[in-house]
Amino acid sequence: MTPDPAIAYFRDSAARLRRILTFATAFLALILLAERLGYAGTYSTAGMDAHTLLVQLTLSIPAILNLAALWSLRTAVAATARGEVFGMVVVAAFRRVGALLAASSFAVMLVMPLFARLMGQTVQRLIDADISTLVLGTLGLGLLFVGSLIDRAAAAQRELEEFF
């Protein structure tokens, strides 16, 4: 039986996207690490300050959550490239992406100003809400819903396969 060209194209596209997401996640993680090490003084003549490094790593929590969301999206795309379009891996990955994005936004707006203040950092606002953070958090909640939709679609597909 000859494979459907549309399905082959879809799987090839998913495989390319998986490679892009792998590169993007690794590249952004390296940039984040280099940036935080720089803020901690690693590249200065005085050298790295351990306390400042701890502060910088703590302040990186939202970015780390976003990178984890990106990697989880990569997991969903990888499963799709293997042909598991409606599999549980995809459902779980979309839910995880949504939860991580929502958690990251929550952390940026409410938790990080508190952490920064507790660590002696200058904080301009008690709640650090901006439009992009709110949109990202809302998209995260939307992806939780998309995960549920994919789960329902998988159940419908299994039901149809039972008939035929």
Image (cartoon, rainbow, N blue to C red):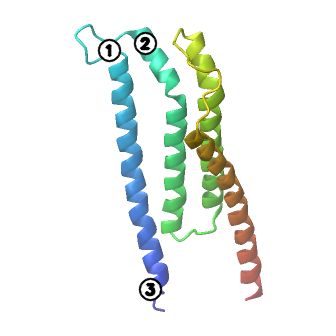
Q: Which residue in the structure is indicated by mark 3? A: 5
Mark 1 vs 2: CB contact within 8 A: yes
> What percent of the width, then of the height, locates residue 47?
28, 10
**Closer to viewer: mark 3 or mark 1:** 1
Q: Position of residue 162 (x, y in %)?
A: 76, 82
Q: Amino acid at mark 1?
A: Gly
| Picture layout, residue 154 above or below residue 159 | above
Q: Which class describes the residues within 10 Å of circle 2: few (<14), some (14-19), or many (20+)? A: some
Amino acid tagged 2: Thr
* 3D distance between C-alphas at marks 1 and 2: 8 Å
Q: Which residue is mark 2?
A: 52
Q: Residue at 51% across / 23% down in the picture?
A: 59
Point out the tag, 1 or 2, that comes first from the N-terminus. 1
Q: Which residue is mark 1?
A: 41
Relative to 36, is 146 above or below? below
Task: Give the number of the disc on residue 4.
Answer: none
- The residue lying toward the viewer, choosing from 2 and 42, is 42
Give the answer, above or below, for where 95 lies relative to 7: above
Q: Position of residue 14 (x, y in %)?
A: 45, 66
